Image (cartoon, rainbow, N blue to C red):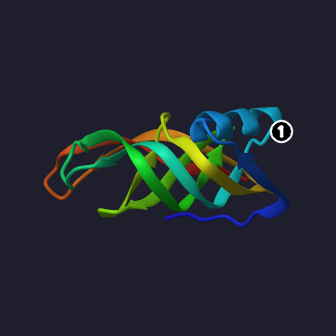
Amino acid sequence: MEGHGFECSKFWILRIDPGEDILISLRKFIKENNIKQGVVVMGYGTLAKISLHWVTHNRFPPENHYDNWEGGIEIMSINGMIVDGEPHVHITASDKKGAFGGHLEEGCICYVLCEIGIVEVSGAEMIREVVTITDEYGNTSKRPQLKFIK
């Protein structure tokens, strides 16, 4: 475990319009505003289409399941990190069948509205580096790990 304190330098609110891809719009906004590191602290709205992935079990190596579907979908929460200008974002959403969540992928299309709050941070640099981890059975896998450069 490792943690670091940061200064909150700016709070951004992003409006995504109907028909726009949420992840593509978020990446474009981050690039246009030169946001190198930050926290996606909130997001809500509706989706016409959703595309996400999640891990399917707790063994090594991890296995991802990708899925997408259409319909009236409510965004209950969007949150994540921006490291080196790249967002890593998760979404919780619901439809008439229930609630679900996972890693936000391209293909999540705004239906009526989507609004996202981003806190830009400073005071140290964050990077993601790939490290090898070992489970209790000796199986190894690679995963991205957040690292702080002070």
Picture layout, residue 65 above or below residue 119: above
What residue is drawn where x is 60% and y is 65%? 3
* Front in this rendered view, residue 20 or 2: 20
Residue at x 61% of width, y 33% of height: 24
| Any part of residue 84 in sight | no
Mark 1 falls on what kind of element? loop
Residue 124, visible in the rendered structure: yes
Q: Residue furthest right?
A: 9
**Residue at position x 71%, y 52% in the image:** 38
The answer to which of 58 and 80 lies nearer the viewer is 80
Residue furthest to the left: 137
Q: Is 138 placed left or right of 11 in the picture?
A: left
Q: Nearer the viewer, residue 148 or 103?
A: 103
Q: Nearer the viewer, residue 123 or 109?
A: 109
The residue that disc 1 covers is: 33
Callout 1 crowding tier (Cα within 10 Å): few <14, some 14–19, many ≥20: few
Residue 94 drawn at (x, y percent): 41, 61
The answer to whether 113 appears left or right of 10 in the picture is: left
Please state if 91 lies on the left or on the right of 62 as rendered. right
Residue found 62% across the figure and 36% down from its top: 20
**Spot occupied by residue 134 in the image (x, y as percentages of width and height):** 26, 50
Residue 103 coordinates in the image, percent (x, y)? 43, 48
Numbered marks: total: 1
- Pinpoint residue 142: horizontal percent, then vertical percent: 34, 39
Q: Amino acid at mark 1?
A: Asn
